[in-house]
Amino acid sequence: MTRWIYTRGRAGGVGEYGLWDGGSPPVLRTHFHDEGQWTAVLAGRRVFRVGAEVVTVAAGQCLYIPAGVVHQGLEAGSAEVRCINAYAPACRGDRPILVDDMPIGALAALAGVSREHFSRRFRRAAGCAPQDFRIQHRLNQARSRLKGDEPIAAIAADLGFADQSHLGRLFRQAFGVAPMAYRRMMA
C-alpha cells in the first residue's frame, strides 16, 4: 500500500482511523484536526513537527496530538512504515482554537495591534499564520461533510475554495488522499 486508508470508527468512540502500511508516508502540509489524534507506530518510525518541536515516534510508541494543535508529518527516513492514526473526540483539557471569519486586519484592530504584529503573535501561539489556520479549519469542515453525499463541488464552493480542484489539492496535501477517495473510504 502506498497511500493512506481511512475508515470510520464506532459511534460514541473513535470517529475515524487512518492506516499506513508500506513505504515512508508522504510529507503532509501543516494542519490540525478538530479531533484528538493518536498515532501508534507498529513498524519503522514517524517524525512530526508539533508546534515548534520535532518528535520522532518509533515502533512500539504512541503520540497524542490534542485537537486544534498544529502539526505536520515529516520525512522519517524509514523505508517501511506501519502505523495507525485514531481520531477521537477532543479529550478533556484539549483546547480547540475558535475560528472567526472577521478579516485579520479587523481582528488586529480589536486587539489594538497592527495586522503584522497580530499575525506574528498568532503564528507563535498557533504554529501557523492566521490565513493558513482558516484554510485548515475549512479543510476540516470539508472532511466532515465528505462523510455525507453532498456534491464535492458544492462543498468546495460553500467553504470558499476557488473550485473543486483547489479543495482537492489542499485536501491531499493535508490528509494524504483525494476528497473522493476519502469519501469512498468513509462510506
Image (spheres, rainbow, N blue to C red):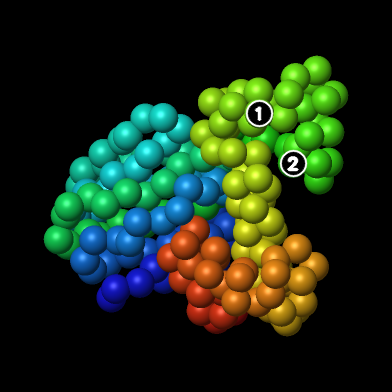
Q: Is residue 124 left or right of residue 133?
A: left
Q: CA distance from mark 1 to mark 2?
A: 18 Å
Q: Amino acid at mark 2?
A: Val
Residue 73 position in % (x across, y down): 37, 50
Tell me where residue 168 sits by quadrant. Answer: bottom right
Residue at mark 1: 116
Tell me where residue 22 sits by quadrant. Answer: bottom left
Question: Residue at 49% of width from left, 67% of height from top?
Answer: 172
Question: Residue at 30% of width from left, 57% of height from top?
Answer: 83
Q: Earlier in the sequence, mark 1 or mark 2?
A: 2
Query: Disc 1 or disc 2, which is closer to the eye?
Result: 1
Question: Residue at 57% of width from left, 80% of height from top?
Answer: 180
Other-residue count near label 2 (Cα within 10 Å), few / some / many at <14 / 14–19 / ≥20: few
Q: Amino acid at mark 1?
A: Glu
Local secondary structure at mark 1: helix
Residue at mark 2: 99
Q: Is residue 160 visible?
A: yes
**Residue nearest the observer in this picture, 130 or 181:** 130
Task: Tell how many labels.
Answer: 2
Local secondary structure at mark 2: loop
Image: 50 above or below 141: above
**Residue nearest the observer in this picture, 15 or 101:** 101
Q: Is residue 186 visible?
A: no
Residue 116 position in % (x across, y down): 66, 28
**Residue nearest the observer in this picture, 62 or 179:** 179
Other-residue count near label 1 (Cα within 10 Å), few / some / many at <14 / 14–19 / ≥20: few
Tags 1 and 2 touching, CB below 8 Å: no
Quarter in which the N terminus is drawn: bottom left
Residue 77 position in % (x across, y down): 17, 52
Tell me where residue 69 sits by quadrant. Answer: top right
